[in-house]
Image: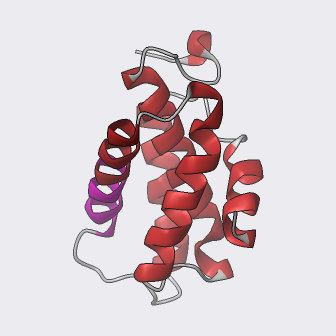
Amino acid sequence: MSDLATQLVEQAKEYQGKSQGEQEYLLAMALADIQSEGTVPDLGPRDFWIRARDDLVRQILHQRVAVQGVAGVAAQQVAMWADSGDFSSVRFQIALAILTAMVTDAVLNAAGGGGSDENNQST
């Protein structure tokens, strides 16, 4: 596992188990912080990241990863996605950790394994 993926597994724990709406809000806030530095395009960066989440979830579900390995696979996939899009800098670390948590929770929910804390999901 890459250094970035290892860091993302640990950092994502803080964001796992939150509702999808809360995770998306946290991602939007992290991207807003980055955007104020002029590194994210103005045209829909949040939607870009949500589409990336959905694509990564589909890829992981297709691989049929065991529930206990989802977080590591999600972190690796997010790290590879980040590298391919020049998002792997320290500047994007929080957004990538949130994305990792979002992907992990979505895969677990889709696979019937629940999130990190199913009772923490709000409606």
| Residue furthest out toward the left | 43
Q: Tell how many labels.
A: 0
Write the residue at 65% across / 29% down.
Answer: 68
The spot of residue 7 in percent (x, y) is: 75, 61
Q: Is residue 52 left or right of residue 79?
A: left
Q: Is residue 96 visible?
A: yes
**49 in the magenta segment:** yes
User: Residue at the spot x=62%, y=56% of the render?
Assistant: 97
Quarter of the figure with the N terminus: bottom right
Front residue of 90 and 41: 90
Q: Nearer the viewer, residue 64 or 10?
A: 64
Quadrant showing the C terminus:
top left
Q: Which residues are magenta?
A: 45-54
Viewer can see residue 32 = no
Question: For residue 99: magenta?
Answer: no
At 29% from the left edge and 52% from the top edge, which residue is drawn?
55
Question: Seen from this angle, which residue lies furthest bottom?
Answer: 38
Would you place residue 93 above or below residue 25 in this image?
below
Tell me if residue 60 comes above or below residue 91 in the rendering: above
Looking at the magenta stretch, what is its main secondary structure? helix
Q: Residue furthest top?
A: 119
Looking at the picture, the colour scheme in use is secondary structure
Residue 110: x and y in percent read 37, 24
Q: Position of residue 63 (x, y in %)?
A: 39, 41
Q: Viewer-proximal residue, 33 or 49? A: 49
Classify 27 as above or below 103. below
Q: Position of residue 76 (x, y in %)?
A: 57, 59
In this rendering, position of residue 94 left or right of residue 11 = left
In the drawing, does residue 89 fall left or right of residue 21?
right
